[in-house]
Amino acid sequence: MEPNLPKVVQRFMSEVAVGEHGLTKLKIELKSSSWLMRGISRIVSVFNPRFDQYITTLGNTIYVPDGFLEKQPIRVLETVAHETQHAMDFNCSPVLFVLVYGFPQILAVPVGIAVGLLTGLWWLGLVVGLLLLAPLPAPGRCWMEIRAYRTSLQVGRYVYRFSDREMERTKEWIVSQLSEKWYYWTWPFPSMIKRALDKDSLLDKPGHVKLIKFLAEHDLSM
């Protein structure tokens, strides 16, 4: 059974979240009702016991924790818009998205195995694999998250009517997310992230244009 979505989220999914970049159907599903998420949780919880509390997007499905959809509707919309951008990027090129988002950590297993086989030294392959699993800078992941986090800036601008100072604080929060542990230190260069967020060049992309139009046309002010 599909969860009961806030009306503003239903409108967003019908007007904005479909039809772009091959994204023809977007679903929101509770993690607790998904056998896939329950299975992943059993594995991931060994390293991250709070996995069940995170939003996880795979393909066209956004998996949310219990209670998430009961939050303030605009907060739910902001998160769904963020995850929709990931779904759109994934649909453009699924394989490329996974490789770019996961690089360099995604290379840990194949490169580690290759090094072990080529050298005949299993311990060297293990060392190389562990090195690639370290929190190395991940430019592709950072770039895709910046694209998605621009939805938070749009909600701040068009819904909350943030002042310039409030917008700056939102950007600072995004910078902290991407440069610190929350995204595995994906890009530990705060000033570079800030410069990217200050540019509006990505706001002319189809998904962002539709979101801005949606926010402008609906009375979502607090």
Image (cartoon, grey):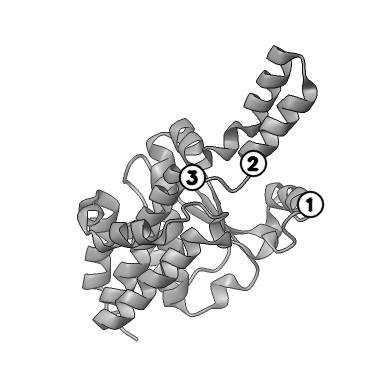
Q: Cβ–Cβ below 8 Å for labels 3 and 2?
A: no
Q: How busy is the neighbourhood of tag 1: few (under 14 within 10 Å), some, or many (20 plus)? A: some
Q: Cβ–Cβ below 8 Å for labels 3 and 1?
A: no
Q: Which of marks 2 and 1 is nearer the N terminus?
A: 1
Look at the picture and state if 49 lies above or below 94: below
Residue at 36% x, 69% y: name it: 171
Q: Where is residue 189 in the image (x, y as percent from the top left)?
A: 42, 56
199 displayed left or right of 173: left
Q: Please name the residue that numbered disc 3 is placed on.
A: 138
**Type of residue at label 1?**
Arg
Which secondary structure lies at badge 3? Answer: loop
Q: Where is residue 13 in the image (x, y as percent from the top left)?
A: 39, 59
Which numbered disc covers residue 133? 2
Q: Earlier in the sequence, mark 3 or mark 1?
A: 1
**Type of residue at label 3?**
Ala
**Type of residue at label 2?**
Leu
Q: Nearer the viewer, residue 206 or 171?
A: 171
